[in-house]
Amino acid sequence: MVINYREVNLFIWRKRQPIVLALGGGGARGFAHIGVLRVLEEEGIEISRVVGTSMGAIVGAVYAQLGEAKATEERFLKLMQDEAFRTSGLPVAGKKKISESWLDHFAQNIRESIAMNIVAHKRSVLSEERLFAPLNYLLRDQLVQRTKIPFAAIATDLKTGEEVILDQGGIIEAVAASASLPGFLPPREINGRLLIDGAATSPVPIRAAKRLQTGKVIGVDVSQNLPEKPELDNVIDVVFRSFSITSRHYHDELVKEADLLIRPPVGDYHWSEFRKMKWFIHKGEYTAKEQLRAIRNL
């Protein structure tokens, strides 16, 4: 019997299940997604859909529009040098400085008391314009359903607590809702829903990816590690630590649902460290290459 290998390969190709990419949130750590995308591209692994949460939605939307990892990286590099980013307030957001001086501690307490009085009458620290300026630089104003690669952003309904899939309508509006970090950026109202960052329900949007399309889901997780030695000096520290523990347990159960999980070692870095962009990209690329055999096996 003569085997027609061309027909066999064609049969195998037709039987392959599509690959859906679920990009998680993590602020600047999300640049690691670009490194993962670069490796998948180099290996000729076709992505049938990109689903993103928060920074994963931002990177995913740019990639879905441009269709190339290299072009996506270049777009972000240009943003880092642009006034739209420098004035966004994102580069200076960071961890509270620890001081040993009692006078500095006293001044810090005064500042925090003033800040609490201010935020008690506001929905966010920054205005929505601070987020829209970078998004308008990164993205073309088009409908989500018209990107080169099918795309969806994931947000959270602040009133009902439901996960919301945004795969219709304006792409900038959808990504802005997905990346509206609670307290830091204001909620977005879309179709009667008040939406915040998708990480509240979908830190890595694996379930949404499975609902949107049949296929194998590769999750890319760039979430922050739970600190082993947390500061527990006051009531606020204790409360926030308890919330972090709850969130981490939910996260750990969620990521088990991915057919394959790629987790670049970036979890010990703060979400605001945007200047480490190239380093984060390298870590994403390195980790994806380590898992190439598992990726091919999908």
Image (cartoon, rainbow, N blue to C red):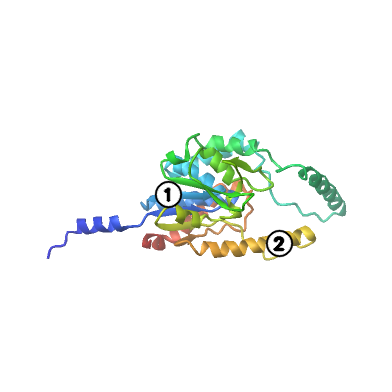
Give left or right: position of 238 versus 137: right
Label disc, if present, on residue 241 of the rendered structure: 2
In this view, the residue in front, 140 or 38, is 140
Within 10 Å of disc 1 (Cα), the crowding (few <14, some 14-19, many 20+) is many
- Local secondary structure at mark 1: strand
Q: What residue is shown at x 52% (from left), y 62% (from top)?
A: 255
The answer to whether residue 226 is visible is no
Give above or below for 253 relative to 75: below
Where residue 172 sits in the image (x, y, percent)? 54, 38
Where residue 52 sits in the image (x, y, percent)? 51, 49
- Quadrant of the image occupied by residue 127: top right
Q: Name the residue furthest left.
A: 1
Q: Where does label 1 land, which residue?
A: 49
Q: CA distance from mark 1 to mark 2?
A: 35 Å
State the quadrant of the C terminus: bottom left
The total number of labels drawn is: 2
Give left or right: position of 97 versus 60: right
- Local secondary structure at mark 2: helix
